[in-house]
Amino acid sequence: AQKVTQTQTSISVMEKTTVTMDCVYETQDSSYFLFWYKQTASGEIVFLIRQDSYKKENATVGHYSLNFQKPKSSIGLIITATQIEDSAVYFCAMREGRGSALGRLHFGAGTQLIVIP
Amino acid sequence: GPKVLQIPSHQIIDMGQMVTLNCDPVSNHLYFYWYKQILGQQMEFLVNFYNGKVMEKSKLFKDQFSVERPDGSYFTLKIQPTALEDSAVYFCASSLHEQYFGPGTRLTVL
């Protein structure tokens, strides 16, 4: 069975600091893809970053980076130099490989990030 | 990033009526999806669609639900008849690899 778990319901950080959000996943597939999205207060869902299971290097995009620990089935999102506009709900998601890019995303419950000025 | 559009943004209908939610996916994307999010809860997969066919659907995709994309136009989700428990925000997504989401349609069934 596939499952994505985010245990942190809410995190508050001071602006310009670094925050890490946790996510663990369960899958039987040897090939899978991990994603982080954020949902803004308006409800918009924005794709942030992706990690392919076969890649050892942690993905980095702008001030987002990932801490991929495959033996622990863990994919943490790190945001450096947080800004007020980073305040949102962050979702971790997983898609299994299946030989094509077509596949449902399994989402975690989300972590609300509050950035305090 | 790539933009997915959804029309309408809000829809209020009476239980038992039919509703069609419209999605304009990213033009070169091949795969299309509908997800459902009840307020404050997790995003749940409904269905995906490729090459004119439903490829996978979840238990939430009831018999009253249908999807189509006639002649490469809007990708639509139709619910007929609607039920109270269909009240939610419905998100369309499209992809080549990572999925890009539309802004959602908030459906309220009275």
Image (tube, rainbow, N blue to C red):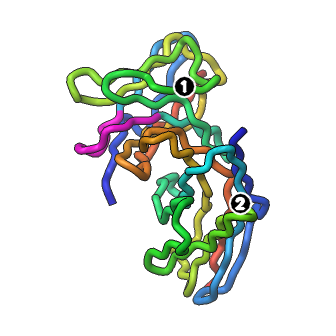
**Mark 1 and 2 residues: CB-CB less than 8 Å, in contact?**
no
In the rendered image, residue A28, in percent from the top left (x then y), is placed at 68, 44
Q: Specify whether B5 is left or right of A87.
A: left
* Residue A40 visible in image: no
Q: Is residue A93 above or below residue B93?
A: below
- Reading the image, the residue beneath label 1 is B57
Instruction: Tell me the amino acid under the disc marked 1.
Output: Lys
Q: Residue furthest left?
A: B71
In the rendered image, residue B63, in percent from the top left (x then y), is placed at 56, 11
In the rendered image, residue A67, in percent from the top left (x then y), is placed at 63, 74
The quadrant of the picture occupied by the N terminus of chain A is top right
Q: Is B31 contained in the magenta span?
A: yes
Q: Is residue B30 above or below residue A38?
A: above
Q: How far apart, in angstroms, are the residues tagged by discs 1 and 2?
A: 26 Å
Q: Is residue A57 above or below residue B98?
A: below
Q: For the magenta stretch, what is the residue range?
A: B23-33
Q: Nearer the viewer, residue B82 or A38?
A: A38
Residue at horizontal 53%, vertical 61%?
Answer: A54
- Please identify, in this view, whether the residue under mark 1 or under mark 2 is nearer the observer: 2
Q: Residue furthest right?
A: A7
- Using a 10 Å C-alpha cutoff, classify the residue at mark 2 as few (fewer than 14 neighbours), some (14 to 19) or many (20 or more): some
Residue at horizontal 70%, vertical 54%?
Answer: A25
**What chain is tagged by disc 2?**
A
**What chain is tagged by disc 1?**
B
Q: Nearer the viewer, residue B45 or B30?
A: B30
The image quarter in which residue B94 lies: top left
Q: Nearer the viewer, residue A78 or B20?
A: A78
Instruction: Tell me the amino acid under the disc marked 2.
Output: Ser
- Reading the image, the residue beneath label 2 is A73
Q: Secondary structure at mark 2?
A: loop
